[in-house]
Image (cartoon, grey):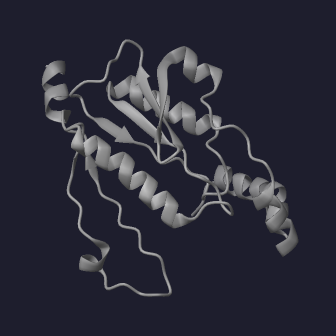
Amino acid sequence: VASWQMRAVAVYVRLTRKKRYATRDAGIEFLHAAKGPSDPPPKVLAACEVTTHQVRGRDVHVVRGSGATASDRGAVVYLHGGAYTNEIVDQQWAFAAALAQRTGVEVQVPIDGLAPHHTASEAVAFVAEVVSELVAQGRIAARMRRAEQVHPPRRDRIQITLAVVAVQPCAARAADRN
């Protein structure tokens, strides 16, 4: 049973967001409209060190907590929400910053291209390259299997296999606390 708070949020979303897709033309207009910037907000820049590099011509922001450096502590790849139609928002940036600060682990935030100008296939290739670079650097360990080995391919759906990426130094970090 949903709480009264969740019911209130649902009503709010229905009243404010549904208009974007109320009609086919409204949905197409929203998809083609300019989106906000993907740059980290000033609060995150004040609390963390943020650097940016490019992979496949797309930005990958690297968030580190105050005083943290790239090290053997590992890394996390954070895929923000937005359903490939909206840019990353301040709340998602705040989560990435909190994750970096509280864990001491570097958080990589790849910024995907948005629909309708970019495709899901481009997003998968982009994120796979970000993860592959971290694996090659020994920053993360990943065990991946091809999607065809798990599920036979079907033409009527796109299959995306996400690898669970383990932060390598978890045991060492726990030992540091003791």
* Picture coordinates of residue 89, whole percent (x, y): 64, 40
List the single residue furthest toward the front. Answer: 57
Residue 168 lies in quadrant: top left
Q: How many marks?
A: 0
In this view, 64 is above or below 80: above
Residue pictured at 65% horizontal, 54% vertical:
6
| Residue positioned 55% across, 50% down in the render | 112
Image coords of residue 158 (percent x, y): 47, 76
| Residue under the image location 31 percent in, 81 percent down | 151
Q: Quadrant of the C terminus?
A: top left
Residue 23 shows in this picture: no
Name the one closer to the observer, 126 or 3.
126
Task: Left or right? Give the position of 90 relative to 146.
Answer: right
Q: Nearer the viewer, residue 87 or 8?
A: 87
Q: Is residue 6 left or right of residue 66?
A: right
Left or right of 160, for residue 23? right
In the depicted structure, whether residue 95 falls above or below residue 69: below
- Provide residue 9's location: percent of width, then percent of height: 71, 52
Q: Is residue 159 visible?
A: yes
| 17 lies above or below 90 | below
Residue drawn where x is 73% and y is 53% of the image: 8
Q: Residue 64 falls in which quadrant of the image? A: top left
Q: Position of residue 137 (x, y in %)?
A: 23, 37
Q: Quadrant of the N terminus?
A: bottom right
